[in-house]
Image (cartoon, rainbow, N blue to C red):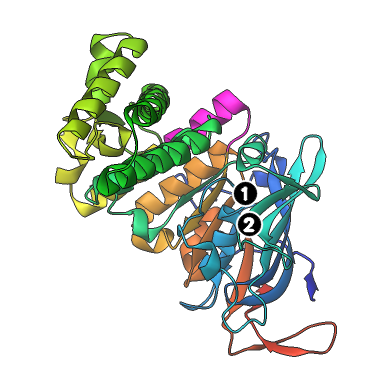
Amino acid sequence: MTALSHHFRQATDSGHDHNGKAVGDGFAHSASRPQLWLSGLLLNNFRNYETVRLEFGQAPVVLVGANGAGKTNLLEAISLLSPGKGMRRAKTAHLARIGAAMPDWSVSAALETEDGVMQIGTGVPADSQTGRRIMRREGMTVSQADIATQLSVSWLTPQMDGVFIDSPGARRRFLDRLVIAFDAAHIGRTNRYEKLMRERTLLISEGRGDAGWFNALEASLAETAIAITAARRALIHDLNEEARHGWHGFPGVRLELQGDIENWLDEMPALAVEDRHMAAAANLRTDGTSALPGPHASEVNAYDVAGDTPAYLASTGQQKALLIAVVLAHARLQERRLGRPPIMLLDDVAAHLDAKRRSALFEALFDLGGQSWFSGSDASLFDGLGKAAQFMKIHDAEHDAEHDSGVITKTPKCEWLI
């Protein structure tokens, strides 16, 4: 495999903010240099990469190349190092390289921390009997919740632009992703709730199960439903405090969570809500329906604080600004509460912002202090990052990449731009 040493791009003086100063010029001497960042990345059999090993510095990383070259695949690989299904929510079986002899794949990284370098990774081992993805830390298999205590990754992608006008389920998934950064146990709660819901629906549809079975199942459902809702509400409360004033020209934003469980929690103690949920479940079951109130039916809405305008009524550009405002506020909240901002992944975001918004985003990320990763087809869009940014060119798979073994393969070629 080819090891690439990193070089910092010697950018021109064309990258400046609206005060005439390049956003990243002071990075090397800034007190906001990342305390947690990726210094190495190794992909095996992942997406369109057969094998690639890359090394990085702390500065912002910009991946440039033609559409389809593999830029987003690199960002997706990083997103999979954090809990959840990654930025594309792809099935595990779809992550292995097409045409590979084996379905195994892996993503490994060197994570620089204040205590030294930590090796983390994810993938499907070659000897896996289930085809399930696992997480590893220092060579040991660990839970997603364990990884969540070490690393958080946040992202913005073009597919997220319509989240405020997308399905309620898309907004709930977006909110749950924000919750997980502070409450790793939320992963288990949501998975358990979905499993219990499926089990109850199946029992009702097949006419199986006695009263005792249903009572136990619905008691677990009620308890889990209240825990999920409480975690969501706690995150929204803290996030709204962080986001209400806006930042770097991005608007103030307020999130709101609505639903039966939420209304009941406003009226009565949590234990009483559990009892009410169980009673509702029993009544609906008696009527022969598997319908159920709960966090699976909650509605998440966002509002522009200026004028209290619902995001779904805002223009496309304003919806994008509100989304960025939420993600930035969430990152700031992590920096304040956890002592570390997340690694930020911004896939093709710069191309869809005007120059003023783009400059504001670069400034905000620089002030945030974490490691940021960008992708785009036009390198000039990132001149505002200043001299410190690391620029990597991703050539598409039509360019042959020669490995140290001498084997020629069709895989993207990555090279640093100097």
Quarter-wise, where is residue 95 in the image?
bottom right
Q: Position of residue 283 (x, y in %)?
A: 19, 27
At x 30%, y 44%, the residue is 201
Q: Return the residue found at the far right.
A: 405
Q: Is residue 191 left or right of residue 201?
A: right
Task: Indicate the secondary structure of the residue bearing disc 1.
Answer: loop
Is residue 404 a member of the stretch shown in magenta?
A: no
Query: Disc 2 and disc 1: Cα gap in Å?
Result: 6 Å
Quarter-wise, where is residue 235 in the image?
top left
Quarter of the image with the N terminus is bottom right
Q: Is residue 223 left or right of residue 21?
A: left
Quarter-wise, where is residue 282 in the image?
top left
In this view, the residue in front, 405 or 375, is: 405
Is residue 335 a member of the stretch shown in magenta?
A: yes
In this view, the residue in front, 365 or 206, is: 206
Q: Main secondary structure of the magenta part?
A: helix
Badge 2 amino acid: Lys
At x 33%, y 47%, the residue is 202
Task: Indicate the secondary structure of the residue bearing disc 2.
Answer: loop
- Say which residue label 2 marks: 387
Q: Position of residue 133 (x, y in %)?
A: 61, 57
In this view, the residue in front, 58 or 119, is: 119
- Say which residue label 1 marks: 25
Do the residues under discs 2 and 1 have CB atoms within 8 angstroms? yes
Q: Is residue 27 above or below residue 262?
A: below
Q: Dot 1, crowdedness within 10 Å: few (<14), some or many (≥20)?
A: some
Residue 327 appears in view: no
Q: Position of residue 101 (x, y in %)?
A: 67, 82
Q: Earlier in the sequence, mark 2 or mark 1?
A: 1
Residue 371 appears in view: yes
Badge 1 amino acid: Asp
Q: Magenta part of the protein: which range?
A: 329-341
